Amino acid sequence: MSKGEKETLKGDKLRELIHLVYLNSKYGTGKARISRLKEALGYSTGGIYNALDESGFFDRKGDEINLTSKGVEYAERTLLPYFSAFNPIAYMLMFLGTLCIFQWYLWISAHALIFDWHVGTVLIVGGIVLRFFLLRLVFWAHKLKKQL
């Protein structure tokens, strides 16, 4: 694939399969099971094996799937940028939290209070969770739904 050429995939199932295998390899055991993914995504038995073998995105060993370097590159360039949209929100929350804690410090020294320090702490923690743990939360949600 050349630099200017954009590769497109046909089918939401294949994109979702790449996304789930990527999340499992990054935050899970690293070995996604074909039987679980087949049921979760609605593939037929022949359909999932066709997607795994013919797409070039997966490395299959027995009942375990991993992404090839092409699959990892596709996931990072095409599927994951949507999650980076939460980064500005996370930074804003961390900034507002820091501002609230600074304002609380001013209350302690000058008795001028708008927000309590608890609000600042909650904003900072919320921003950190959005910025650094959003993909892990998505992975755990898929795990709870028994997709991985």
Image (cartoon, rainbow, N blue to C red):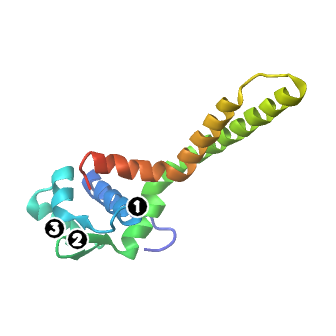
Q: Is residue 139 visible?
A: yes
Residue 46 lies, with reference to residue 107, above or below; the image says below
In screen coordinates, is 135 left or right of 93? Answer: left
In screen coordinates, is 100 left or right of 14? Answer: right
- Whole-percent x and y of residue 67? 33, 70
Residue 69 lies, with reference to residue 146, above or below; the image says below
Pick out the residue farthest to the left.
Answer: 45
- Quarter of the picture holding the C terminus: bottom left
Query: Which mark sits nearer the N-terminus, 3 or 1?
Result: 1
Residue 27, numbered circle: 1
- Mark 1 to mark 2 CA distance (whole Å): 16 Å
Q: Nearer the viewer, mark 3 or mark 1?
A: 1
Q: Is residue 57 visible?
A: no
Residue kind at label 3, given as amino acid type: Tyr
Q: Which residue is mark 3?
A: 49
Residue 90 lies, with reference to residue 75, above or below; the image says above
Residue 64, numbered circle: 2
Q: Foreground residue, 80 or 145?
A: 145
Label 3 crowding class (10 Å Cα cut-off): few <14, some 14-19, many 20+?
some
